[in-house]
Amino acid sequence: MSLKGIFPIDKWGFNNNSVLTDLPELEKERLMSHSSEHLYSKGEMIFREGSLPSGIFYMRSGMAKKYKVDKEGREQIIYVANAGELLGYHAVLAEERYPDNAAALEESLVGFIPKEDFLDVLHLSKTLSQRLLKSLSHEFTVFANSVALFAQRSVRERFAMQLILMREKYKPGIEQGMDVEINLSREDLASLVGTARENIVRIIKDFKEEGILETRGRKIIINDVAALLKAANY
């Protein structure tokens, strides 16, 4: 089922996957002149909170989580990025240390552009600077919606909403007629929602009994998107 016309998915996800595409050829060559790629295994760190940024990262394939860790060692996932999305460019633009952590949620191919090349092209390219400004403005909307979600919704409603968002993240590459499988651990789902693992397990059980979803191992398949939207109180 498509969300078109019934849910504004663009208000809940970053829209930076077009920032680096179709740049003028000379700008693209200069930007990628010292770029590299690295295959990260599941759970491997891409960057750590507090470290100095040496460049920006872009997801070639796979998924990565941006998250914070509190004093008790508990994770709070801020955002899940998939193929085409950028990571780490906020710290480079602000000339600050990374404000959060990033790690691969699955085997992921991640590109890297050195800070010097990125800033050099940014200073010269009207196209890149305009795209980044637009992207940053859009991300403010996404974070505003996320803050409102945590402040105003119950755990059940937040979990329903996150399942809707994650289903869209896992959609790319899925052939028509195939099930979209959300392949996240219960711990990561709990971290995404901001609750305990036990609550996630209980709500999954409730949603299964209501016919909203089914599970195959740890994978979650949404059977009734409309009912999930209703559960999210959207």
Image (cartoon, helix red, strand yellow):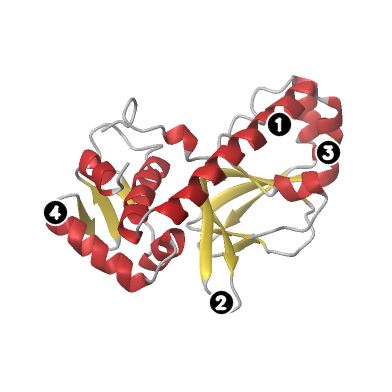
| Closer to the eye: label 3 or 2 | 2
Q: Secondary structure at mark 2?
A: loop
Asked if labels 4 and 2 touch by Cβ distance under 8 angstroms, the answer is no
| Distance from Cα at disc 1 to Cα at disc 2 | 34 Å
**What residue type is disc 1 on?**
Leu
Quadrant containing the C terminus in the rendered view: top left
* 37 vs 217: above or below: above
Tag 4–tag 1 contact (CB < 8 Å): no
Measured Cα–Cα span from mark 2 to mark 4: 34 Å
Dot 3 lies on which element?
Answer: helix
Give whichever of discs 1 and 2 has the lower sequence position.
2
Label 4 sits on residue? 210
Q: Is residue 43 left or right of residue 154?
A: right
Task: Give the numbered dot on residue 119.
Answer: 3
Q: Earlier in the sequence, mark 3 or mark 2?
A: 2
Q: Is residue 194 left or right of residue 21?
A: left
Circle 2 residue: 73
Amino acid at the residue labelled 2: Gly
Q: Position of residue 24 (x, y in %)?
A: 74, 20
Q: Image quarter for residue 150?
A: bottom left
Q: Earlier in the sequence, mark 4 or mark 1?
A: 1
Instruction: Report the Cα–Cα distance between label 4 and label 1.
Output: 43 Å
Image location of residue 130, percent across then percent down: 72, 25
Q: Is residue 197 visible?
A: yes
* Residue type, label 3: Leu
Q: Residue furthest bottom?
A: 72
Q: Secondary structure at mark 1?
A: helix
Which of disc 3 and disc 4 is earlier in sequence? 3
Q: Position of residue 131 (x, y in %)?
A: 68, 27
Q: Is residue 105 left or right of residue 2?
A: right
**Residue 133 - label:** 1
Question: Would you call the spot at circle 2 few (<14 residues within 10 Å), some (14-19), or many (20 or more)?
Answer: few
